[in-house]
Image (cartoon, helix red, strand yellow):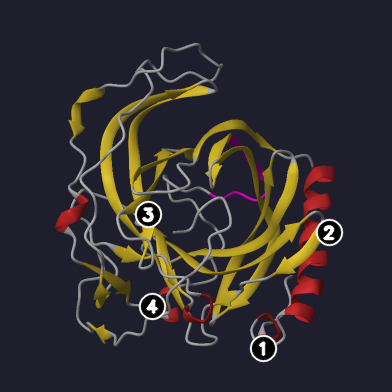
Amino acid sequence: MRRFHKMVGTVILFLMIFVSACAPRSEPLIAEGPPLPATSEETTEATEAPVEATEEPVATEETAEPTEEATEPVATEDASVAQFPDFDPNNFDSNSIVINNKWMPMKPGTFWAYEGTALDGSETVNRRIEYTVSDLTKEIDGVRTVVAWIEDYNNGELTEKEVAFYAQDKDGAVWYFGEHPEDYENGNFVEAPTWIAGLADAKPGIKMLPDPQLGSPVLYQGWGPDVEWSDYGQIDQLGQKYCIPLNCYENVLVIAESSLKEEGAYQLKYYGQGIGNFQVGWKGTDDTQEELKLAEYKQLSQEELADIHAQALELEKHAYEVSPDVYGETAPME
């Protein structure tokens, strides 16, 4: 699944795609993909307490309860197939880089930092992820996308730098068009499992629907067969209240993410309206058991944003060198 940490692929799957040409535009057109593995019934309990949302940090007990209107978590084992969204570049316009989906807003200069832990084998590591929406754009597969800048740390050591690409269609769905992650060990570059929509059989996918509901289709978030990237997402909960040390959020959306090579393993991503992802958890047979909470959320200064801009361009320069057959086929960021 698309994690906040490096994933290791083990299986390359092939599939045939059946595209539905006449589905209504209120939800993206979809085509069936390969069968998904059966999921585990095992779930983790919510760990935060409901209180009214505030702008100031609040101290809360580590409990959580649903609101009266809250819906129960969906049974993920009911989903037998993930589906490919029917991508049409004509369903994007010049506003594709204006990402204002209420569940996943991406205003240039917005900064999120997440902190928590994960298992690396038998060792527990301290995790920190820094995620920034840059002021750069890049054309991919006929669509102008927003460039996100991501840095990943284990026990204070940088393990990954990444540029990732998003766009919003006319219906308000947020699409994922690929990524160039560079993995590091002891400060040295190791590899770059790059996939870009439209190249090497890669396809864009949907990260966030405009109006996600329980029972919404299980959708691929992208497809990069050369690097075994097959992440899909499913609505797991809706209408809950959750608190983290930074703040409390009502009417929370939870998406369970997995991939075709991770049978029964799910990463849970918690979304609040107007802020986006504020917490990460897990359920099932997830070996990493990663748990993260939003620790910082702010709008960068012009100087800070200019620094991100420069770092992203520097990474792209290296991307053209280490991924000439994929990234090397793309137009430069602007």
3 with respect to 112 (left or right)? left
Report the residue at 70% width, 53% height from top: 159
Disc marking residue 325: 1
Q: CA distance from mark 3 to mark 4?
A: 20 Å
Which span is picked out in magenta?
106-115
Q: CA distance from mark 1 to mark 3?
A: 29 Å
The image quarter containing residue 142 is: bottom right
Counting residues from the N terminus, which is met first, the one under dot 3 or under dot 4? 4
Tags 2 and 3 in contact by the CB under 8 Å rule?
Answer: no
Residue 149 in sight from this viewpoint: yes
Query: Would you name the residue on which mark 3 appears?
Result: 257
The image quarter containing residue 232 is: bottom left
The amino acid beneath tag 1 is: Asp
Disc 1 crowd rating (10 Å Cα; few below 14, some 14-19, many 20+) is: few
173 with respect to 212 (left or right)? right
Q: Is residue 78 above or below residue 105?
A: below
x, y percent for residue 239: 26, 34
Q: Nearer the viewer, mark 2 or mark 3?
A: 3
Does the magenta stretch mainly form a helix, a strand or a loop?
strand
Query: Would you name the residue on which mark 2 appears?
Result: 310
Query: Would you name the residue on which mark 4 appears?
Result: 87
SS type, badge 4: loop
